[in-house]
C-alpha cells in the first residue's frame, strides 16, 4: 500500500469519527434542554355588576345631539378632470371643423372634375361637328373640282374661251358658276370668280402637256397654298412654273377658305 492510499484511508476514518461525535453532541443537548415554566394568571375583581355598568341615563331622558354648524360652501378649484373634459371638447370641436372643411374641399373637387368632364365633352362634340362639316365641305369641293377638271379638259382641247372673260386676258369676273378658262388654261373654285386674268406660267419651259394645281383660297380671295395634284407632265421645273403662277391668282371674296384647282396646259410655241 502506498503512502497516498494510507493518507486517504486516514482522512476518511477521521471524517467518520468527527461526524459521529457531532451527532452524539447534538443528541445530548436536545435531551437536557431546560423548558421554562409558564406563569399562572392573576384574578382581578371588578366589583358588583350593577356598579360596573357605570352611569346609565334614564329611559325617558333626552340626550341632546350636537347640530352640525352650517358652513358656507367654498368654491372649489377646477380639478384635473374638468380641465381634461374642456380639452376634450375643444379637440372634438376642432376635429369636427376640420372634417367639415375636408368635406367641403372634396365636394369642390368633385364639382370641378364634373365641370371639366362636361367641358371636355362639349369640346369633343364641337370638334366632331366641325370635322363633319369640314368633311362635307371637302366632299362638295372635291365633286366641284372633278367637274371642273372635266370642263377644263374640254376647254384645253378645244381652246374654248367660255366664261365672262375672254381669251385675250380680260379674265373672269364674278362668275357664280365657279369655273372658267383664260388663255388656254382653266380654273375651278365653287361660287367664286377670278379677278382680272388667270396668271400665266413663264414661257421658259421645254415640256408639253397638262399640270393640275390644287389651290387654297382664303375669304379675301388670295391663294394661300398651291400643291401639285397631277397631270401629264412630271418635269419638276415645269411643275414649279405652274405652282408659281397659281399663287399669283386673285379670286372674289367668300365667307371662308375654299379649295379649288387651276389647270395649266403647256404647248410649245
Image (cartoon, grey):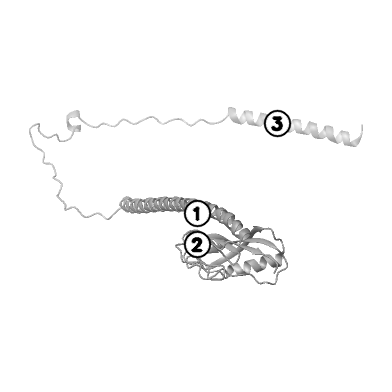
Label whose residue precedes the other's in the sequence (1 or 3) = 3
**Pointer 2 residue:** 257
CA gap, disc 2 and disc 1? 10 Å
The residue where tag 1 is placed is 137
In percent of width and height, residue 249 lies at: 55, 69
Q: Residues within 10 Å of mark 3 (few under 14, many from 20)?
A: few
Image quadrant occupied by the C terminus: bottom right
Up-down relation of residue 39 to residue 92 (above or below): above
User: Label 2, label 3: how many angstroms apart (C-alpha)?
Assistant: 139 Å
Which numbered disc, 2 or 3, marks the residue that appears first in the sequence? Answer: 3
- How crowded pointer 1 is (Cα within 10 Å; few <14, some 14-19, many 20+) is rated as some
Asked which secondary structure carries label 1, the reply is: helix
Q: Which mark is residue 21?
A: 3
Q: Nearer the viewer, residue 149 or 227?
A: 149
Foreground pick, 112 / 185: 185
Q: Position of residue 34 (x, y in %)?
A: 53, 31
Amino acid at each position: 500500500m502506498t503512502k497516498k492510499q494510507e493518507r486517504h484511508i486516514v482522512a476518511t476514518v477521521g471524517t467518520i469519527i468527527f461526524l459521529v461525535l457531532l451527532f452524539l453532541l447534538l443528541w445530548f443537548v436536545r435531551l437536557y434542554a431546560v423548558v421554562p415554566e409558564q406563569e399562572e394568571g392573576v384574578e382581578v375583581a371588578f366589583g358588583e355588576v350593577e356598579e360596573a355598568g357605570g352611569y346609565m341615563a334614564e329611559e325617558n331622558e333626552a340626550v341632546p345631539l350636537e347640530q352640525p354648524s352650517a358652513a358656507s360652501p367654498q368654491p372649489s378649484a377646477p380639478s384635473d378632470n374638468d380641465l381634461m373634459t374642456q380639452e376634450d371638447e375643444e379637440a372634438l370641436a376642432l376635429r369636427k371643423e376640420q372634417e367639415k372643411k375636408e368635406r367641403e374641399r372634396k365636394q369642390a373637387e368633385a364639382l370641378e372634375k364634373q365641370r371639366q368632364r362636361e367641358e371636355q365633352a362639349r369640346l369633343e362634340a364641337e370638334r366632331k361637328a366641325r370635322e363633319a362639316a369640314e368633311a362635307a365641305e371637302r366632299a362638295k369641293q372635291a365633286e366641284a373640282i372633278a367637274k371642273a377638271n372635266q370642263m377644263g379638259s374640254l376647254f384645253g382641247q378645244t381652246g374654248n374661251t367660255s366664261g365672262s372673260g375672254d381669251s385675250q386676258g380680260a379674265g373672269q369676273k364674278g362668275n357664280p358658276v365657279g369655273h372658267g378658262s383664260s388663255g388656254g388654261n382653266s380654273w375651278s373654285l365653287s361660287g367664286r370668280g377670278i379677278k382680272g386674268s388667270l396668271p400665266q406660267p413663264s414661257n421658259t419651259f421645254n415640256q408639253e402637256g397638262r399640270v393640275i394645281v390644287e389651290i387654297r383660297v382664303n375669304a379675301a380671295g388670295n391663294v394661300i397654298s398651291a400643291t401639285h395634284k397631277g397631270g401629264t407632265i412630271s418635269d419638276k421645273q415645269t411643275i414649279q412654273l405652274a405652282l408659281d403662277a397659281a399663287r399669283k391668282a386673285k379670286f372674289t371674296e367668300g365667307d371662308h377658305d375654299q379649295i379649288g384647282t387651276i389647270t395649266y396646259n403647256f404647248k410649245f410655241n
